[in-house]
Amino acid sequence: MAASANAVSSQIQDSAVDNQNQPSNGSSISGTRNSNKGTSQSTVKRLENTSICVPIVYGSISFPLKKTEEYNTHRWTLFMRGANNEDLSQGIAKVVFQLHPSFAHPVRELTAPPFEVTEKGWGEFEANIRIVWRDPNEKALVLTHMLKLYPPLNTGKNGPAQGTGFTGGSSNNGVSGAGSNTTGDKKNGEPEPVIHQYYDEVVFTDPTQTFQRQLLSNDLNQQRLVESQEPSVQEYYKPFSDDADFKILLEAQKFLEQELVSVKDRILRADAHKFELENALAEVAAKSKAVSAAATAAAAALASSNVSSTSTMTSGSKRKSKSSG
């Protein structure tokens, strides 16, 4: 099995699961101290008002076998990894996977990445993933995950598309978790794997100085990336990064800025055109007023001329009458 290279053991004493610390899938997780082991709390120096967030992704990927075996229909991998496939071993001492009791050696302990177990089977079951931190004062974190072999059924013609979906997690200590269930349709004639995974953030409050250095020892620019031992699985170890969203936001901001400049330019041109139209209308109005005034004056002059002509004709007629008499 792929997990054998990671020092798998089935020690029963290391398989105990603290069910009281099980968070719901997709919820945020708060790192807590275990005062029942390790150095006493009075001698442990902690960094007050300090929080460290460790993003993780856990889940399963299952592939249907091309040729169904007698007791196996799928090949699957159960995993816990860094959100961007970074090496988390600087803060994690081991990861213990507890499988269904029907498997040989159902408890698999991995002390080095990649933290994953690959097996074959025919049924879905609930597995436990226990993360043991390098600081003995921190309680082991237990995750419960349902191994999925089959994609969810369509809810109907108007329902959500088969094989895709997102679920939101509850919020704890101000940090929200987001889960994602992904199953694809056929690709190049081959069925896509069923991917059932969750993104979460483990928050350590007031960690010890030593543990803080361990968690922050892997510089982001020099951190070692971890690859799956299964090439078919590695293809689907996508990073859960904000970079893509940040790029989209930057592109959106750039687009809005360009649109704002374009709109301002159009407004300026529209204002200039409006000013030209107003001047043209003012000139037309002035000319119209002048023409109207000239027409009025001409009409008045014509009317005055007609009155004068009528008066002259009347006077001439009177003189002619007197002369005839």
Image: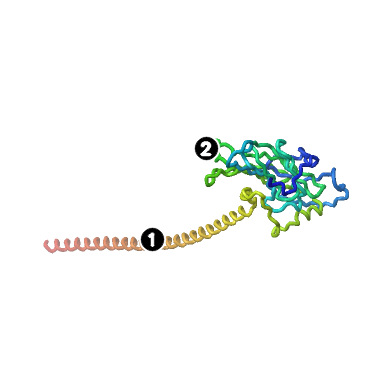
For marks 2 and 1, the one nearer the N-term is 2
Characterize the local packing of mark 2: few (<14), some (14-19) or many (20 or more) Cα atoms within 10 angstroms: few
Lateral position of residue 313 relative to residue 269, left or right? left
Q: Which mark is residue 113?
A: none
Q: Nearer the viewer, residue 10 or 256?
A: 10
Query: Is residue 176 in view from this perspective?
Result: no
Q: Which quadrant of the figure contains the C terminus?
A: bottom left
Identify which residue is drawn at 80% across, 46% down. 138
Q: Which mark is residue 285?
A: 1
Name above or below for residue 246 compared with residue 298: above
Q: Which residue is mark 2?
A: 158
Q: Residue 126 location, x and y as percent?
A: 69, 37
Identify which residue is drawn at 67% across, 36% down. 125
Q: Nearer the viewer, residue 164 or 10?
A: 10
Look at the numbered disc 1 and give the secondary structure of its residue: helix
Amino acid type, mark 1: Ala
Q: Residue 176 location, x and y as percent?
A: 68, 45
Lateral position of residue 166 relative to residue 99, left or right? left
